[in-house]
Image (cartoon, rainbow, N blue to C red):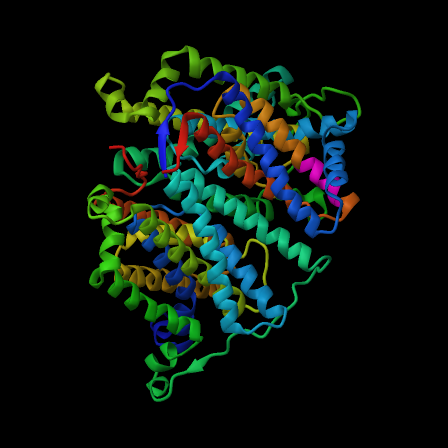
Amino acid sequence: MLLEPRTHTPLWMTIIAPIAAVFVVMVLCSGLIMWAGAPVLQSYIALAKGAFGSKFAISETLVRATPLMLTGLAAAVAFRAKLWNIGGEGQLYMGALAATYFGTGMVNLPAPLMIPFLFVVGAIAGGLLLLVPALLKTKLKVDEVVTTLLLNFVILLMANYLLFGPWKDPMAMGWPQGAPIVDAGILPKLIEKTRLHGGLIFALLASVSVWLVMSKTKWGLEIRAVGLNQDAASFAGIPINKTIIRTALISGGLAACAGVTEVAGTKEYLTLDISPGFGYTGIAVAMLAGLNPLGVIIAAIFFAGIYNGADSMSRAMDVSNYIADVITAASLLMVMLAVMLTRMRIRFS
Amino acid sequence: MDFLDMFLNIGFWAATVRMATPLIFGTLGELICERAGVLNLGIEGIMTTGAMVAWMWVYQGGDLWTAVLVAAVFGMMFGFLHSIFSVYMGLSQHVTGIGITLLATSLSYYSFRMLLPGVTTPPKITPFQELPIPYLSDIPIFGEAFFSQSPLTYLAFVLVGVVSYVLYRTPVGLAVRMVGENPMAVEVQGIDVYRVRTGAVMVGSGFMAVGGAFLTISVFDAFYFDMINGRGWICVALVIFASWRPGKALLGAVLFAAFDAIQIRVQQSSASFIPYQFFLMMPYVFSIFALIVMSRKAAYPKALLVPFRRGQR
């Protein structure tokens, strides 16, 4: 078996690859639905309805897509530079912790200033958290995959300590949750009677800005060059370490903003379950999007739909909603394979 | 808290050896994969799968040793899947590994929910009992701590020797080490690099799954979600700490487990003024520090993370 590079990849192939991959995953996962004894087609219809079937469903899907766009962007930016940031979950909680620290009465600003302020302090906190593994990587050659993964556990325990200890809201009747974010810091609702909040606008703007930076600026070029070939980038005079540090700050900051949107938008206070693995799902989002910041928007909405749809499917059909995690993980692998097949062809000899 | 008392305590050493066991399996498994040039970040998920299937096998009436075998087989299946992506297709080992972890974990949780719908308290099984080794277990302190353990713990220690022997003293071991250092040279010898790497990843993944199984059918008697709790990632760190040597991997795992055992005992005696979460952080922080200390002089297998594509240089 030989893999040889294709001389050129037609555009239709690039577009069809992720769609085909997701389709294959759906077919494979129908085996799991059959195992549960549920009718496959009706189950998928229930999933689609739960995801996009009503105004309410769509708004809920977009609420869930908001943090996924930001963690997806974080992974997309970092992976472009081959900085393997698997710490999105920890950075998300870091952003949430910063928003809680500054947003629950310590600082009082009018809303037009308070909301940007929360995003800025959150992003700084998340960026600094990823700065540690990035510096260890550039200065001491410590592998960043393991350090970012391990820091996730440290930050979650830190949040656990704070919410069971000094930051516990005495008004919360014993629940481990933070004090509510001040009114000026709450992200405004976009549509009446839904949970859809301004975080979505922020995430969309972030996607467009990241796309502009990555494809139209010197910084973006440097990040991509470092990811493609460090030696060549270094030969071309690109400061490798500086670029990696910069990438880390951007990536960590983006993931942390997902924590801010959850604390200041979706929940309005900090809990220990603000993220059901958004940091890890962000990796699947970035891969489905082919690391394209604009593609991240669509990929995030898709995965958010799968998760929300699986919740309603599990209620209707008695299929465990862990199927959403299976679909996400399988899509991550299958998309990677499909994208490779657009660049390579397999020759059996 | 008297430290001397603690170090003379049989319970402390027995706990250390017990806690080291899953780490030994996991670290050896990861070491085999990395020696062949493949970083296997599927470890966390493969351990979860091992823990789930072994427990489920026993819960459904199966035998304990068969459960270990079943766990190993499931681990090897995920290892095979990993190598399709990372070895045959030459895709990013980082992303493949994370994908395998997410897939193995979610499939385990899904299967657990499907096989046991609507249980709130996890049902229990009868796990492996301690198997004191005659005569040896009568030695004061040392014997009582080391030779009155679960059979799987003995297996872990024996496997350290076996892996060491196979890696350094057999043609198979040489081939495994070579594909991790210089795959092209191996290919020239007429050995199939893909097959050697795939075999190493599968065997390594089998080890990882048995490490997970140890948790559910030996230490504990039930399967909980999130019970691996980063142990897989700690094993990845331990491999670097051990500079890819089985003997040092054993040392690292035992040191780490001793540290964990100290942490738990100190936590129990000083819980009043230091919050317990800080103690729980320590294994992760300790792993990071171990990485910092060891990474400078780490002699990575030269072809680690480098995909091999036949017919290309």
Q: Position of residue B37 (x, y in %)?
A: 30, 46
Task: Give the residues in magenta.
Answer: A307-314
Question: Of all residues shown, which one is farthest toward the front?
Answer: A349
The quadrant of the picture occupied by the C terminus of chain B is top left
Number of numbered discs on residues: 0
Identify which residue is drawn at 34% across, 18% down: A222
Identify which residue is drawn at 50% across, 64% down: B213
Can you tell which quarter of the image residue A345 is in? top left
Q: Is residue B180 above or below residue B91?
A: below
Q: Is residue A58 magenta?
A: no
Q: Main SS of the magenta segment?
A: helix
Q: Is residue A193 left or right of residue B112?
A: right
**Residue B285 seen in the figure:** yes
Q: Could you say which is closer to the camera, residue B141 or residue A12?
A: A12
Q: Is residue B265 above or below residue A234?
A: below
**Residue B299 seen in the figure:** no
Q: Could you say which is closer to the camera, residue A106 or residue A92?
A: A92
Identify which residue is drawn at 57% across, 36% down: A278
Q: Position of residue B253 (x, y in %)?
A: 35, 61
Q: Is residue A38 above or below residue A107?
A: below
Q: Position of residue A104 (x, y in %)?
A: 62, 31
Identify which residue is drawn at 26% across, 38% down: A140
Can you tell which quarter of the image residue A61 is in? top right
Q: Position of residue A114 (x, y in %)?
A: 60, 20
